[in-house]
Image (cartoon, rainbow, N blue to C red):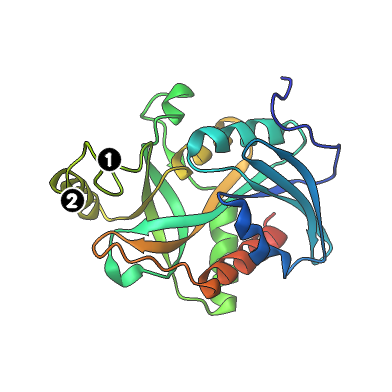
Amino acid sequence: MTNTYLKLDSTTYDTAILIGDYARIAYFERYLDSFEVLEKSREYHVYKCTYKRKPMLISAVGMGAPSLIVAVEEMRNYGIKKFLRSGTIMSLRSEDLGKLVIVEGAVRMDGISKDYVNQGYPAISSYEYVKTAHEVLEEFEKEYISGIICSTGSFYTHFCPGNYASEEVVSKFHENLLKQRVLGLDMETAALLVVSRLLNVQAGTLGVMSIDRNSRKIDNTEDIFSTLAVSSLEICFRWR
């Protein structure tokens, strides 16, 4: 396979942290030993860095599963074997706003993973990731939850009402997920977990509940994103 978008140098990196908004790299930079821009191509802002002397990549991949999966496919060609999505999740329960989330698995409504394998195939996080994430967050004494989220392919039909989907339709969708003990919503994790497993690499998501689906309150304080960043780095440092 020849890469179409990412032209990275040959490295010894085996771990990549995938973020959505490139501006959030600033929260990671303060904890790093070294930090260097490797490439900027379309929505991809790729940085090579070291944390506690361990080399790793951090890459902004934009919003949604399609661009993230392109990054996973192409980074795998450079030897990346562990992918951590570090990003935001919409909380279905108001009491979870601001909490970190260790994602164990995801409901597949992303629209991308079905192009790889049938809908019966599960979207499950790597055991090694889940185990390491619990250890790190317990040691850091951070408030967190762990469980299943749902990944959808569109925002204004499943997260919030838009010009087509009404408040009633979106609310009913959320209530059904709550009955199934689903914690929240994102647009990337299910595809990440399915495709990574098919490609024989490890993957997981460490998220932060940044939006409350009931009040639409947003928690985008510097503190929660700094906590997410340092927790993500430490997990990747220990992840084997």
Task: Judge whether residue 180 can be spotted in this image.
Answer: yes
Residue lying at the far bottom of the rendered structure: 141
Task: Judge whether residue 200 can be spotted in this image.
Answer: no
* Drawn side of residue 212 relative to residue 190, left or right: left
Residue lying at the far top of the rendered structure: 1
Q: Amino acid at mark 2?
A: Ser
Q: Amino acid at mark 1?
A: Thr
Residue at 48 percent of width and 40 percent of height: 64
Residue at 73 percent of width and 69 percent of height: 31
The residue wearing badge 2 is 171
Q: Pinpoint residue 135: horizontal percent, then vertical percent.
A: 58, 69
What is the count of numbered marks?
A: 2
User: What secondary structure is found at the residue carrying circle 2?
Assistant: helix
* Drawn side of residue 231 relative to residue 146, left or right: right
Q: Pinpoint residue 136: horizontal percent, then vertical percent.
A: 60, 70
Q: Residues within 10 Å of mark 2 (few under 14, many from 20)?
A: some
Residue at 79 percent of width and 56 percent of height: 49
Which image quadrant: the C terminus?
bottom right
Residue at 67 percent of width and 47 percent of height: 59
The residue wearing badge 1 is 157
User: What secondary structure is found at the residue carrying circle 1?
Assistant: loop
Disc 1 to disc 2, C-alpha distance: 10 Å
